[in-house]
Image: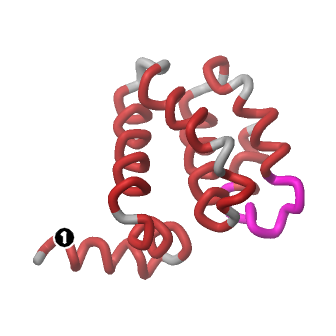
Amino acid sequence: MYDFSLLSKKYSDRIDNAGDLLGQFIENFLDDSTIVQLSLLTATVKLFIRKPAIGQELIPRVLKYATEDVDHVDLRERGYFYWRLLATNPLAAKVMFISMIGYRLLYFLSAR
């Protein structure tokens, strides 16, 4: 499971049925370990950014699980961070998730 979530996180744009596969794994989100939950959260956000039509039904569910239904603070905070980023600045989210340059750009912009 963890291996698939890592693969889908990195290659969600190349896996034809990534949405269906992630959807199946998200059904068991609350039963998975924290590391798998973090991977699923990131993979779902990346899928949503790269293929919005496919990820739009998964993103609310995984963000709800991550922000309301888990006790792990880091997972909850990451869920809130992604939620706020997608809601307030989708372009920054796209830049951040698609390239490592995005991390540097966000750091530069936040330092101003």
The image quarter containing residue 77 is top left
Q: Is residue 27 left or right of residue 21?
A: left
Residue 66 x %, y %: 49, 31
The span shown in magenta is 9-18
Q: In this view, does 75 lie above or below 9?
A: above
In reply to whether residue 94 is colored magenta, the answer given is no
* Residue drawn at point x = 38 percent, y = 72 percent: 103
Q: Which of 91 and 30 is in front in this view?
A: 91
Q: Is residue 53 above or below residue 60?
A: below
* Residue drawn at point x = 46 percent, y = 75 percent: 95
Q: Name the residue under label 1.
A: 110
Q: Which amino acid does label 1 sit on?
A: Ser
* Residue drawn at point x = 32 percent, y = 80 percent: 105
Predominant SS along the magenta part: loop
Residue 109 x %, y %: 22, 77
Q: In this view, does 26 lie to the left or right of 98?
A: right
The image quarter containing residue 12 is bottom right
Quadrant for the C terminus in the image: bottom left
Q: Is residue 74 left or right of residue 98?
A: left
